[in-house]
Image (cartoon, rainbow, N blue to C red):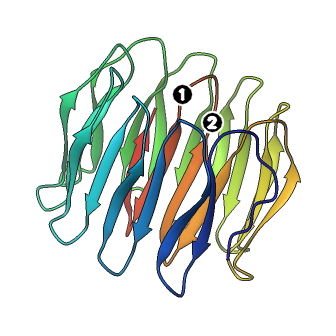
Amino acid sequence: MIKQLGCDDRLVIALDNHDHMIKQLGCDDRLIIALDNHDHMIKQLGCDDRLIIALDNQDHMIKQLGHDDCLIIALSIHYHMIKQLGRDDRLIIALDNHDNMTKQLGRNDCLIIALVYHDHMIKQLGHDDCLIIALSIHYHMIKQLGCDDRLSIALDNHDHMTKQLGSDDRLIIALDNHDHMIKQLSHDDCLIIAIKIHDYLITQFDRDDHLIISLTIHDYLITYF
């Protein structure tokens, strides 16, 4: 069970691993989703004008249900390609697992990254004043390459602990996979959560008025900036 430790008026959820369901406990006008691992489907319970997606692992496809002017992507794991369906002036990326490279299709002044699965490394290609991270799956470590005053974390899978490297006034949490517990270390009025469900990691970084999530499904990393 992931219990609510701290929150504002944003999203509050509870995870029931036994029933494989994320149930809605509280919400505002933002995004509310339910994850049914048994059916491999993220269903839409409530939404605002932001991004709404459905994940069908069986078909290996993220289909577009609704959208605003933000980023809309479709992931075809079978073809190893993230195709661009819609975009604004933010980040647009294409993932080619066959070539083990995330190529840059479009960008603004935000974060640009390249993902090399073969070397298990997310390298920094371009950046602004936001967060820059490098993911070394082989060493089970997310290292901080560059940052601003926001959130900086390091993930040590071997020790099953998310350690704090740098922070601002936001939320800093530690994830202990061994104990299946998300502990609260520090927070502000926002809500930042991490959900680890049988190798399914959903990490919500809430900054300004946007929503940033990362979904890792069996080494398939989807990052929404």
Q: In the figure, 18 relative to 188: above or below?
A: below
Q: In the figure, 112 relative to 23: above or below?
A: above
Q: Which residue is mark 2?
A: 206
Q: Quadrant of residue 178?
A: bottom right
- Residue 66, percent from left and from top: 27, 37
- Residue 135, percent from left and from top: 54, 51
Q: Quadrant of residue 86?
A: top left
Mark 2, Cα crowd under 10 Å, few <14 / some 14-19 / many 20+, is: some
Q: Quadrant of residue 34?
A: bottom left
The residue nearer to you, when weighing 42 against 57, is 42
The amino acid type of the residue labelled 1 equals His
Q: In the figure, 4 relative to 160: above or below?
A: above
Residue 83 shows in this picture: yes
Q: Residue at x 64, y 70 (%)?
A: 157
Is disc 2 placed on a helix, strand or loop? loop
| Whether label 2 touches label 1, CB < 8 Å | yes
- Residue 41, percent from left and from top: 31, 66
Residue 94 shows in this picture: no
Q: Which residue is mark 1?
A: 210
In the picture provided, is 83 more to the left or to the right than 39? Answer: left
Mark 1, Cα crowd under 10 Å, few <14 / some 14-19 / many 20+, is: few
The amino acid type of the residue labelled 2 equals Asp
